[in-house]
Image (tube, rainbow, N blue to C red):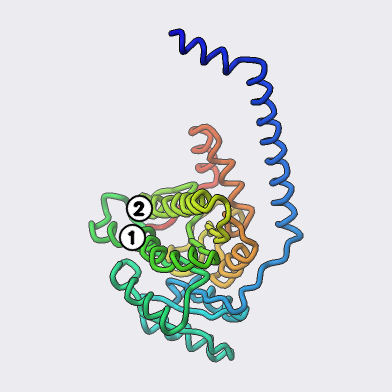
Amino acid sequence: MKNRELLRSRVTSPLCLMLLLAEILVLLCKILYYICESVYKLFALKRKSVAGEIVLVTGAGHGIGKELAIGYALLGAIVICWDINEETNEQTRNEIRKMGKNSVYAYRCDITNREEVSKVAEKVKKEVGDVTILINNAGVGIVKTLLNYSNDEITRKINTNLTAHYWTLRAFLPNMIEKNHGHVVAVSSLLAIVTSMYMTVYSPTKSAVRALMESLDEELRLSSKGKSLIKFTTVFPTVVFNGMFRKPNMRFPSLANPLLPKEAASLIIDAQRRNCRERGIPSHLLPLITTLRNLPDKAQECVKDFVDMSIEPDN
């Protein structure tokens, strides 16, 4: 009891209170400084060059992944295309080569298979070099109610959308850490933040991707004592015309107008080149949805009912 009273008296002593207030003042000044720095970077900082970087894109055989591969190749990067579909993956490579960009390689890889990821990653290191920009883009979007999913569909969705990130990170992150140079981009979804019907598997996997990237960023920051130069970017696209989902039904389509894969890829590359930690695709939707999430539950439901957005389920 005496020890507690002694500790309380020390904490509440005038000197301790003054020191605490000084720390809080310093903290507020730092917060203000970094807010100003962030605004400056958003509008004034030049996008970093990716010329000569070795960029690996998963799911490069179609959709956003294909456009990401093309986009990076046109910016002078060495591009490595990964996809489970060997035919479409090679089509992406050939299309890039027809543009006069020959530093592009295609490898068939099932990213849900840990041993295969490790094996193909070693082949990439020997034949091309060390990956410096990893784009974890591949994903699947089966749309059903929870009880209508088969066990295999749930497993496949979790393994592709989430677990595969662990295997690619474990394959390529160690070399980035060793050289203190690299960038990891994860394609999440706005449906990770505000969900809807039929999203009982998709939304949790995309939310977990966000948590994984935040945790990894913090892990490297603390373990390196703030000296890590490896960047992490999580992007949250709206619905994209890539065949994953059917066109959504929405009362006000302009609020979340579906993007073409090329448009989404361009915005993702821009976010990576600006070293954004998180970016909505398009950018205005992330703060809008984050604000919605801070409303009371019933208020959120009213907004959702008013907007009336829905996605047609798969048979």
The one of 277 and 226 positioned closer to us in this rendering: 226
In whole angstroms, how far apart are the C-alphas of marks 2 and 1? 7 Å
Can residue 160 be seen by looking at this rendering?
yes
Asked if marks 2 and 1 touch (Cβ < 8 Å), the reply is yes
- For image coordinates 24% across by 61% down, the residue present is 152
Residue occupying image coordinates x 52% and y 57%: 234
Identify the amino acid type marked 1: Lys
| Screen quadrant of the N terminus | top left
Q: Residue furthest top?
A: 2
Helix, strand or loop at mark 2: loop
Crowd band around label 2 with a 10 angstrom C-alpha radius: few (<14), some (14–19), many (20+)? many
Where is mark 2, residue-wise? 201
Q: Position of residue 55 (x, y in %)?
A: 51, 74
Relative image position of residue 305 (x, y in whole percent): 50, 42
Left or right: residue 167 compared with residue 43? left
Q: State the residue position of label 1.
A: 157
Q: Position of residue 137 (x, y in %)?
A: 46, 66
Query: For residue 69, which numbered disc appears in the image?
Result: none
Decide: is 100 above or below 184.
below
The quadrant in which the C terminus is found is: bottom left
Which of these two is toward me, 163 or 167?
167
Q: Position of residue 186 (x, y in %)?
A: 48, 61
User: Which of the two discs, 2 and 1, labels the residue nearer the N terminus?
Assistant: 1
Q: From the viewer's perspective, is 101 left or right of 61?
A: right
| Residue 57 sits above or below residue 307 on the image | below
Crowd tier of the residue under label 1, counting other residues whose Cα lies within 10 Å: few below 14, some 14–19, many 20 or above: some
Q: Residue furthest left?
A: 151
Q: Helix or strand or loop: what does disc 1 sit on? A: helix
The amino acid on which the numbered mark 2 sits, given as a three-letter code, is: Val
The residue positioned 55% from the left and 91% from the top of the image is: 98
Q: Is residue 191 visible?
A: no
